[in-house]
Image (spheres, helix red, strand yellow):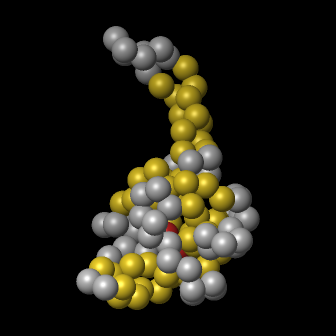
Amino acid sequence: MQKIRKGDKVVVLTGKDKGRSGEVLQVMPKEDRAVVRGINVVKRHQRQTASQEAGIITKEASVHLSNLAVADPKDGKPTRVGFKIEGDKKVRVAKRSGVSIDG
């Protein structure tokens, strides 16, 4: 089970976007990277195609998972993730407050 998943609210720990938070749009477990909305925004030149205009577009580049931490559901500060078995399900728990991260 992954500690950071699509849809999670995360906080950036290091780099040019340190302290900012956003929602995870995509996780790439094989590369240990994630794409976060509004974080690590880069500009790319786009060649014109039948469906797209040419020009410079801005999009989010991936961030290494070690530079991200899940935001605590209580106060939004970065927290580590633990696991707990509730009933017959394994759920993610915030170490900071003990609150369940999964719904």
Residue found 49% across the figure and 81% down from its top: 93
| Quarter where residue 98 is shown | bottom right
Is residue 61 or residue 87 the one in the foreground? Answer: 87
Q: Is residue 86 left or right of residue 38?
A: left
The relative height of residue 30 versus residue 96 in the rendered view (above or below) is above
Is residue 60 or residue 5 the one in the foreground? Answer: 5
The relative height of residue 54 versus residue 8 in the rendered view (above or below) is above
Residue ranking furthest to the left: 88
Residue found 39% across the figure and 79% down from its top: 91
Is residue 31 or residue 101 the one in the foreground? Answer: 101
The relative height of residue 69 versus residue 45 in the rendered view (above or below) is below
Q: In this view, does 96 lie to the left or right of 64?
A: right
Residue found 42% across the figure and 58% down from its top: 6
| Quarter where residue 88 is shown | bottom left
Q: Where is residue 82 in the image (x, y as percent from the top left)?
A: 47, 86
Q: Where is residue 47 in the image (x, y as percent from the top left)?
A: 44, 21
Q: In which quarter of the image is the N terminus?
A: bottom left
Q: In this view, does 93 lie to the left or right of 91?
A: right
- Residue 40 seen anywhere in this rendered image of the structure: no
Q: Number of marks in the image?
A: 0
Residue ranking furthest to the top: 50
Is residue 59 or residue 78 the one in the foreground? Answer: 78
Residue ranking furthest to the front: 87
Residue found 71% across the figure and 71% down from its top: 75
Q: Position of residue 20 (x, y in %)?
A: 70, 59
| Quarter where residue 78 is shown | bottom right
Q: Where is residue 18 in the image (x, y as percent from the top left)?
A: 71, 64
- Residue 25 seen anywhere in this rendered image of the structure: yes
